[in-house]
Image: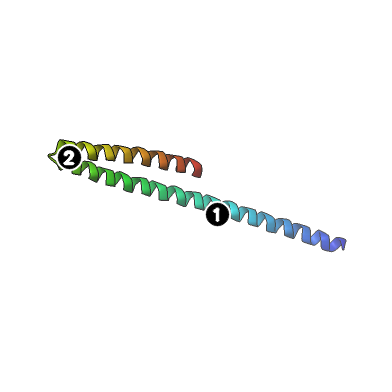
C-alpha cells in the first residue's frame, strides 16, 4: 500500500494544481471579458448621450433644450457611477 499511496499522492496533487491553474485562467478571462463589455457599454451610452445633446442643440425651444440637457447630464452621471463601480469590482 505504501507504493500505491506514493504514486497516487503526486498524481492527485498534480491534478489539483492543474485544476487550480485552469480556474485562475478562467477567472482572468471572465474579468477581461467583463471589462471589455462594460467599456463597450460605456462608449455606447456616451454616444447616445452625444446624440441627445445634438438633438437638444437643434431645437429652438429653450425649455425643451434644458430638459434634454438635464436628462443627458443625469444619464451621464448615472452611467459613469455604474460603470466605474462595476469596473472596480472586476479588477
The N terminus lies in which quarter of the figure?
Answer: bottom right
Which residue is farthest right? 1
Contact check, label 2 and label 1, Cβ < 8 Å: no
| Residue 26 in view here | yes
Residue drawn at the location 21% of the way across and 36% of the way down: 66
**Disc 1 secondary structure class:** helix
Which residue is farthest left? 60
- What label does residue 57 carry, if any? 2
Residue drawn at the location 75% of the way across and 57% of the way down: 10
Q: Nearer the viewer, residue 34 or 52?
A: 52
Q: Nearer the viewer, residue 79 or 3?
A: 79
Local packing at callout 2 (Cα closer than 10 Å; few below 14, some 14-19, many 20+) is: some
Q: Nearer the viewer, mark 2 or mark 1?
A: 2
Quadrant assignment, res 81: top left
Disc 1 target residue:
26
Quadrant assignment, res 56: top left
Quadrant assignment, res 64: top left
Residue drawn at the location 41% of the way across and 51% of the way down: 37
The percent coordinates of residue 27 (x first, y second) are 55, 51
**Disc 2 secondary structure class:** helix
The percent coordinates of residue 63 (x first, y second) are 18, 36
Mark before the other along the chain sequence, 2 or 1: 1
**Left of 19 or right of it: where is 27?**
left
Numbered circles on residues, count: 2
| Residue 91 in view here | no
Residue drawn at the location 41% of the way across and 47% of the way down: 38
Q: Find the distance from the CA under tag 2 to the CA under tag 1.
A: 46 Å
Which color scheme is applied? rainbow
The percent coordinates of residue 61 (x first, y second) are 14, 39
**Left of 70 or right of it: where is 14?**
right
Amino acid at each position: 500500500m505504501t507504493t500505491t499511496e506514493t504514486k497516487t499522492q503526486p498524481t492527485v496533487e498534480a491534478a489539483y494544481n492543474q485544476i487550480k491553474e485552469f480556474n485562475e485562467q478562467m477567472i482572468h478571462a471572465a474579468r477581461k471579458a467583463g471589462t471589455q463589455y462594460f467599456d463597450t457599454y460605456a462608449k455606447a451610452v456616451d454616444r447616445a448621450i452625444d446624440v441627445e445633446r445634438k438633438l437638444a442643440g437643434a431645437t429652438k425651444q429653450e425649455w425643451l433644450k434644458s430638459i434634454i440637457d438635464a436628462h443627458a447630464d443625469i444619464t451621464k452621471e448615472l452611467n459613469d457611477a455604474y460603470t466605474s463601480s462595476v469596473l472596480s469590482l472586476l479588477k
